Image (cartoon, rainbow, N blue to C red):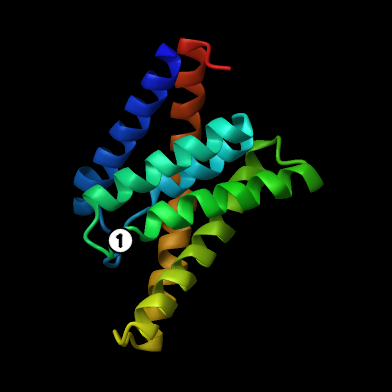
Amino acid sequence: MKKNWLLLLFIFFVSLLEATVFSHLMLFRTKPDLLLAMVVIMAITLKPNQALLFSLASGIFKDMFGAGVFGIYILLFPLWCFLIIKLSRKISLDNDIAGIVLIFFVDILQNIFIRLGLLFAGIYITWYVFLKIIFLEAVYTTVMSPFILKSYKFFKLHIKYK
């Protein structure tokens, strides 16, 4: 039980890091989605019920600290987690490279869903900005994901989370 609270505190710390530090380290007006990387990593490494619970918590933190439409990440993060759990039963995602590649593609899909949702809500975004956000954010998240993966493994090693 204590380990669950510590993991929740770690997710909270990552969400604060994303909302504060990386808001100032934007690259071409995009920032990495560290919580999405955490969701993918947890879906691969944790038990399915724990991964879904922590992905829901990640979505709550992302919506709390974000400036977007409230509730979208509460829906999307458990969805991605569920789909990754199903995918991991079909193919092996045990090595770090597979996880990082998966983070890239999930980030692209998430950005497409969010931008299309904005389009259907009547908020028009030019194609140039649409593609720039999708691909640059995915690349930035993918570049930062090994650091999140290493810190997550360090965290799991030190609290012996299973």
The residue under the point 56% across, 47% down is 81
Identified by mark 1, the residue type is: Leu
The residue under the point 39% across, 39% down is 57
Q: Residue furthest right?
A: 90
* Rendering quarter of residue 131: bottom left
Q: Is residue 152 above or below residue 31?
A: above
The foreground one among 31 and 36 is 36
The foreground one among 50 and 102 is 50
The image position of residue 108, as x and y in percent, is 51, 65
From the viewer's perspective, is 14 left or right of 75? left
Q: Is residue 90 above or below residue 54?
A: below
Q: Secondary structure at mark 1?
A: loop
From the viewer's perspective, is 58 left or right of 160? left
The foreground one among 94 and 84 is 84
Alpha-carbon neighbours of circle 1 within 10 Å: few (<14), some, or many (≥20)?
few
On-image quarter of the C terminus: top right
Q: Which residue is mark 1?
A: 27
The image position of residue 132, as x and y in percent, is 40, 75
The image position of residue 36, as x and y in percent, is 45, 49
- Let me know if residue 87 appears in the view: yes
* Rendering quarter of residue 26: bottom left
The foreground one among 151 and 11 is 11
The residue under the point 33% across, 82% down is 121
